[in-house]
Image: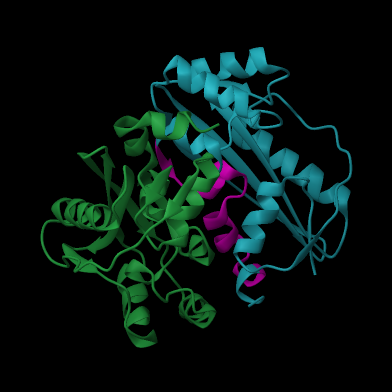
Chain colours: A cyan, B green
């Protein structure tokens, strides 16, 4: 049985959608918060996967990058507003890293998707903040929920933005998905 | 109250995700199946919206286009297989049209998203066909379900591929979404 080393309900939903059976095991790790985005998400995915333990473990990590700066989870509504206003009308990048540990063998991959926000009206920012959806979301939005209304277009794998790069997972470890119908 | 003139569970899910309240009213219409994709989806969305009736009605239509040919819903598993094999490793287009009728005033929009499939292994095609998910899906796949595993990347609005161009909806009729928090 696969162990998912992540608290994220979004990552659980993606695995369920693919028909993968799994359990969740999360250990507290000291995540890196600075550095090259590809290195950052790969290193954090590895930390999480190693900390969870198990024969077959999947770790993942996601960051939102605007003009070279990593936007974490907003600490309050004021910061969420400043994130949304900075993202409005602009293109940013979402990086997701993926680590599979299978019988002690560690394999990793990472992917980036470009996301362009619509030019948001003040009423739209207010609507989104009022929903409370910005809480606990890297960059302050959730593309697979109300945040869909904020986005003009993406270029890349949609699931990388949600939190798990599915195309990379299929390349790295197809049997993890295909075996479980 | 908004009337959604569509049977599609995917379109219902998108409106629910956005927090929009609505009812569903569907009348049988003779949909167009040939012509320029933009004209086709706009005309069909309009047919559905007019047939449903109501003060505030939303109609939508989606087609999958590969090399200029519209791929409809596969009639059987053999045709679903031939669609998947044709889409494998290639880029195709998904067009979605949108019509809002508000107090007799008809407004329409359409959007296209480019979707590139991974080069599918025979085992992946077999896995997908076995899931039965190809049934009743334009082009024979559902990007928001197991079909996520088939897609390499997209360029455009993800929700256009699922069946409702959300960015266009926000441009055409933002109050429909913003008013309903």
* In the rendered image, the vertical position of residue B101 relative to residue B180, given as above or below: below
Residue A180 seen in render:
yes
Q: Is residue A20 toward the left or the right of residue B68 in the image?
A: right
In this view of the protein, which residue sits in the foreground, B175 or A140?
B175
Q: Is residue A100 toward the left or the right of residue A18 in the image?
A: right
Name the residue located 62 percent from the left edge and 33 percent from the top edge. Answer: A63
Q: Is residue A67 toward the left or the right of residue A21 in the image?
A: left
Report the magenta stretch's main SS: helix
Name the residue located 84 percent from the left edge and 50 percent from the top edge. Answer: A50
* In the rendered image, the vertical position of residue B79 relative to residue B119, given as above or below: below
* In the rendered image, the vertical position of residue A23 relative to residue A108, given as above or below: below
Name the residue located 47 percent from the left edge and 54 percent from the top edge. Answer: B12
- Residue B29, quarter of picture: bottom left
Q: Residue A126's x, y, as percent?
A: 54, 19
Q: Residue B131's x, y, as percent?
A: 54, 78
Residue A111 seen in render:
no
Q: Residue A86's x, y, as percent?
A: 50, 16
In this view of the protein, which residue sits in the foreground, B107 or A110?
B107
Name the residue located 40 percent from the left edge and 34 percent from the top edge. Answer: B176
Q: Which residues are magenta?
A: A153-176
């Amino acid at each position: 049985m696969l162990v998912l080393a992540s608290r994220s309900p979004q990552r659980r939903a993606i695995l369920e959608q693919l028909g993968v059976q799994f359990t969740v095991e999360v250990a507290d790790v000291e995540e890196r918060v600075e550095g090259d985005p590809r290195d950052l998400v790969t290193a954090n995915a590895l930390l999480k996967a190693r900390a969870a333990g198990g024969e077959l473990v999947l770790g993942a990590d996601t960051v939102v990058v605007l003009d070279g700066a990593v936007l974490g989870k907003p600490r309050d509504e004021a910061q969420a507003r400043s994130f949304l206003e900075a993202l409005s009308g602009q293109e940013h990048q979402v990086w997701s890293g993926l680590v599979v540990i299978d019988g002690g063998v560690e394999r990793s991959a990472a992917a980036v998707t470009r996301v362009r926000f619509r030019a948001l009206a003040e009423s739209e920012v207010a609507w989104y903040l009022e929903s409370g959806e910005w809480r606990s979301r890297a960059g302050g939005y959730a593309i697979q929920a109300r945040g869909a209304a904020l986005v003009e277009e993406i270029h890349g794998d949609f699931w990388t933005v949600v939190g798990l790069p599915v195309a990379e997972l299929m390349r790295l470890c197809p049997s993890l998905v295909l075996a479980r119908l």
